Amino acid sequence: MSELDLAVEVRGLVKRFGDVEAVRGIDLDVAAGETFGFLGPNGAGKSTTIAMLCTLLRPDAGSARVAGHDVVKERDDVRRNIGLVFQDPTLDGYLSAQQNLRFHAELYGVPKVLVPERMRLVLEMVGLWERRGSLVQTYSGGMKRRLEIARGLLHAPRVLFLDEPTVGLDPQTRASIWRYIEELKNREDITIFVTTHYMDEAEHADRIAIMDQGRIIALDTPAALKAAVAKDRVQLQVDDADAAIAALRERFGLEATIAEGSVTVAVEGGEAFVPRLFAELGVPIRGVSVARPSLDDVFMSYTGTTIRDAEAGGPDPLMRMMVGR
Amino acid sequence: MASTETRPAASATVPAPVRVVVAPAGWRADLRGIKVVWQRELIRFWRDRLRILTSLLQPLIFLFVLGGGLAQIASGGTEGVDLRTFMFPGALAMAVFFTAMFSAASVVWDREYGFLREMLVAPVRRGSIVLGKCIGGATVASFQGLLVMALAPLVHVPYSALMILEVLALQLLLAFMMTAFGVMFAVRVTQMQAFMALMQMVVMPLLFISGALFPLSGLPRWLEVLNRLDPLTYAVNPLRAAVFSHLDLTPAATAALLPGITWFGWQVPIAVQVLVVVAFAGAMLSVAMWQFRRA
């Protein structure tokens, strides 16, 4: 089916909330069978984009097709082809875990004979099988999150949207969920569209779009994105950060920034740079670390800040967007 | 209690994924949607025993406290019929009425707690979710109505299978209309307090004007006009007719207490009154569906 070569096709998509443009005209194509990562700080417009792709929000301009169907004109068709794990809780607390899953299975037309077995599998995957009969309102936050993911994986849709699926989960559960997703992908022609602000999770993706302040600022494979940065990240622990930044500028011609509490500078051949640093900087250094480029550096090279700092700098996405203008 | 929350074992085998399934389209999917939403209403209603009790309280207060209290001064106008007997069909309508409103209010809860989104992205037409909600509301409200119905002998209304069936059918219809009516508003309102305030503002006048608590004979002109415009009127009057037809009333009492509904002097038959309710229910359901589709 040729129209399904593209699982997601987005052209000039725009969404405004009042005066604020949350999504400012983005284009992207996701091939069928691809795992596509959507990376960016909170408030970058990732969830808004997903909401439009899942027919929950109407775009103000531009168009989008999911599994070959227009998200405005063929909403019912889009919804038959997608699965979605929301960022915010969408469980019914007055129902048990099992009842929540059964509700979902019925709504999504999972064949009746498969339901008990499937339910057991996904509940065991997230470690909630023993608690299946409890009302969801008695669950802790982490348990709800896990149940939500289990529910999203109960059926296998053509395009699976995961909006920050593993936020707040312990590493073990995260690993188990990613193992399942990989397995799902290997066996089936499923497309996975996942947003995250965990860099290590984005590494699971075949391609990554980096979004910041409503725009896609980079889109490529993780390897290509990192290769494009080419520079290592050198972080210095110093007592006098201002003096160190000034010295780096004067002696080496390098623009340093403070990221995550350390003076950070990007240089080619980081290891070879360290001895020169100690010899020539003239500011006492208490420690140095050198890191190969990560997706964090990719993000930093495009935006001048790390994701964590971008979030810390402006917890309110609206404020951040105003300031960003 | 560390054992209450089990973590996935590191060695746990990863489950085998199901094959990609495109959810089937068409009326079967929509029927499924209606069914699960309906079932959820029932489960939630059954879980919330307190609600069953509180929704029962209101009609009982009107019937026994207000009815009992006013019986003395009203006795001159009821042609020997106990005021509580007269108000009983009104209480039947009220029980249904408030429960249906509560069902509609759950749309607002669902929005606040996010569950609405789970339903909105589901591969069924949104209309089927509204329909499931309304059928669910009608079911639980009629159950509530049956509980009040059980009190009939206390107000000198003997049990009769036919009467109970007639009343049940009318209650289902009334409850369906009221749930649709509530959902129509609930889709638009995002806060529970606002919804409750709105309902208080709309529901009490509709209830009082409908004649649930007084006979339609000899009303002031303006009240008569409002009464004919109130959709509830056309459900309350048939309810009363269904109950009274099984009582042994004098012609004078029937004339005073059940004068029927007239449109410009034309006596509207009960069947037409029921049709009016059906039409209102259909219209409200359509509006609710339309709003839900745009939500």
Image (cartoon, helix red, strand yellow):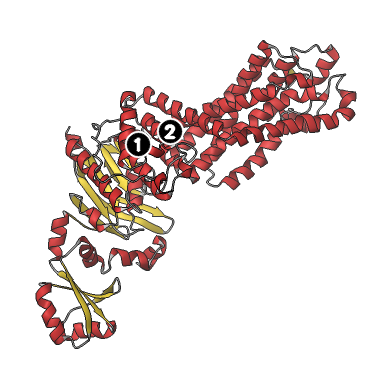
| Left or right: B111 in relation to B15 | right
The chain identifier of the residue carrying mark 2 reads: A
The residue that mark 1 highlights is A75
**Residue A108 shows in the view:** yes
Residues A141 and B236: in front is A141
The residue that mark 2 highlights is A99
Secondary structure category for the residue under label 1: helix
> Residue B201 placed where, x, y %?
67, 41
Q: Which mark is residue A319?
A: none
Q: Residue furthest bottom?
A: A282
**Residue drawn at 35 percent across, 64 percent down:** A311
Mark 1 vs mark 2: same chain? yes
> Residue A252 placed where, x, y %?
15, 82
**Residue A62 shows in the view:** no
Tell me which numbered mark, 1 or 2, is placed earlier along the sequence.
1
- Quadrant in which the C terminus of chain A is drawn: bottom left
Relative vertical location of residue A183 with respect to residue A245 in this rendering, above or below: above
Identified by mark 1, the residue type is Arg
Badge 2 crowding class, 10 Å Cα cut-off, few under 14, some 14 to 19, many 20 or more, is some
| Left or right: A58 in relation to B229 | left
Quarter of the view holding residue B230: top right
Relative vertical location of residue B18 with respect to residue B149 in this rendering, above or below: below
